[in-house]
Image (tube, coloured by chain):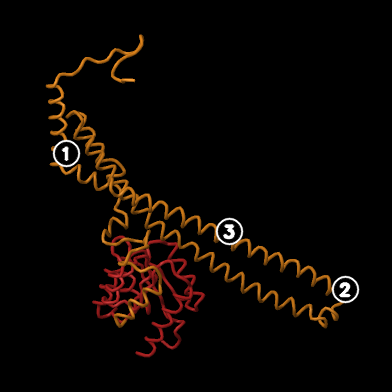
Chain colours: A red, B orange
């Protein structure tokens, strides 16, 4: 990808309000290309059909939660390169450690600020750029 | 006054004292009911549901404070944005009058440039207000997760109480009640996200004094850094 702002984001959250907030913030940060999924099952389906560059996912969701989605992404050879940033209200230390050990690229605890999202996304995008 | 003794006419006569055998029978029945409910697993589960009620109160308090804070924040931001908008409207009228009276003087005096700078500053501020108003809506997600947990608790308590009723009812009524219970909305309601993920906790309601949770993003970053992530 020539320009990081062309990256395609997938926002996964069961609350439409939060999806809109994350989408709005990404737009303000400079990322206009985003789609939404309401749970892990829908997200996985979209990931298999559309090329995404970045996933921002909640954890506590019905059908397939964020940990299960993260595991599914990281064990799929065609998807495991996609960074997954967890944005969640789950504040237990063991959940944060589990997310990191499962391959999450970052962890944001709700409620969060625009500055926090921008910092984490930028850091991950820079790592991607360095790895490419 | 001895409450056991009637002191005036017109009061109900004291009931005849029950025989010790009746007390013994009542005691035995109560014990039997208690043991039966215990064996059926109703009492422990009912107790567990009741034990969760204080937690439900905390969660409802969390919802009230979150929604109140969000409403306050939005109303304050709207007040500030409206004040800025009024300022721009006033300045626009004033500049228009200056331009009509003497356009050259309006430019030369710096009134036009001042206005342009004002507009630039205020639009940036209003844009920030709009972002903050958008962020304030995150209460919906956080309180929604908490509501799901409280609904799950209420549903569980309802089911436990219904089971007690069914166990205590005469057989023909119990059969009807059981059939009705299985067709009730609570029994057929889809599992909430919280119920679907029993190991996940959602927002932390009372983080004070807890060492197993983080209180802010800084603690998340410190924890991950300490693990080398």
Letter of the chain that mark 3 sits on in the rendering: B
Q: Which residue is disc 2 drawn over? A: B101
Letter of the chain that mark 2 sits on in the rendering: B
Q: As rendered, which of A29 and B200 lies closer to the eye?
A: B200
The reply to whether label 2 and label 1 mark residues of one chain is yes
* Mark 1 vs mark 3, CA separation in Å: 53 Å
Q: Residue A24, image x and y in percent?
A: 49, 70
Eyeballing the image, is B79 above or below B177? below
- Location of residue B83 by image quarter: bottom right
Relative to A19, is A64 on the left or the right?
left
Q: Residue A90, image x and y in percent?
A: 34, 65
- Location of residue A14 by image quarter: bottom left
Q: Residue furthest right?
A: B101
Q: Decide: few, some or many residues near mark 2? Use Cα within 10 Å; few <14, some 14-19, many ≥20.
A: few
Q: Decide: few, some or many residues near mark 1? Use Cα within 10 Å; few <14, some 14-19, many ≥20.
A: some
Q: Which residue is disc 1 drawn over? A: B37
Q: Residue A10, image x and y in percent?
A: 39, 72
SS at badge 3: helix
* Mark 2 vs mark 1, CA separation in Å: 91 Å
Q: Which residue is disc 3 drawn over? A: B75
Eyeballing the image, is B137 above or below A114? above
* Residue at left offset 16%, top offset 44%: B41
Relative to A37, is B107 on the left or the right?
right
SS at badge 1: helix
Can you tell which mark lies on residue B170? none
Q: Nearer the viewer, mark 3 or mark 2?
A: 3
* Mark 3 vs mark 2, CA separation in Å: 39 Å
Relative to A3, is B192 on the left or the right?
left
């Amino acid at each position: 990808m020539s320009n990081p702002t062309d990256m395609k984001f997938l926002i996964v959250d069961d609350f439409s309000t939060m999806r809109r907030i994350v989408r709005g913030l990404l737009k303000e940060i400079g990322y206009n290309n985003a789609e939404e999924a309401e749970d892990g099952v829908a997200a996985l389906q979209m990931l298999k059909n559309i090329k995404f560059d970045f996933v921002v996912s909640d954890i506590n969701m019905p059908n397939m939660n964020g940990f299960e989605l993260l595991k599914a992404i990281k064990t799929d050879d065609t998807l495991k390169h996609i960074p997954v940033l967890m944005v969640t209200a789950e504040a237990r230390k063991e959940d944060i450690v589990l997310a990191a050990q499962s391959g999450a690229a970052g962890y944001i605890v709700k409620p969060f600020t625009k500055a926090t999202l921008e910092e984490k996304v930028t850091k991950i995008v820079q790592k991607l750029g360095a790895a490419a | 006054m001895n409450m056991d003794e009637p002191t005036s006419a017109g009061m109900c006569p004291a009931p005849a004292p029950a025989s010790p055998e009746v007390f013994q029978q009542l005691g035995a029945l109560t014990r039997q009911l208690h043991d039966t409910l215990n064996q059926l697993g109703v009492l422990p589960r009912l107790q567990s549901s009741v034990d969760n009620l204080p937690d439900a109160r905390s969660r409802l308090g969390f919802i009230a404070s979150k929604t109140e804070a969000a409403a306050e924040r939005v109303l304050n931001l709207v007040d500030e944005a409206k004040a800025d908008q009024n300022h721009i409207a006033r300045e626009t009228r004033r500049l228009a009058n200056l331009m009509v009276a003497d356009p050259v003087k309006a430019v030369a005096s710096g009134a036009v440039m001042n206005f342009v700078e004002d507009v630039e500053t205020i639009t940036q501020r209003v844009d920030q207000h709009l972002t903050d108003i958008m962020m304030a809506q995150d209460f919906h997600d956080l309180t929604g997760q908490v509501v799901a947990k409280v609904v799950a608790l209420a549903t569980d308590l309802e089911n436990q109480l219904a089971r007690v009723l069914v166990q205590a009812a005469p057989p023909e009524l119990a059969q009807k009640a059981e059939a009705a219970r299985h067709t009730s909305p609570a029994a057929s309601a889809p599992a909430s996200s919280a119920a679907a993920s029993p190991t996940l906790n959602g927002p932390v309601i009372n983080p004070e004094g807890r060492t197993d949770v983080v209180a802010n993003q800084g603690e998340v970053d410190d924890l991950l850094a300490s693990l080398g992530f």
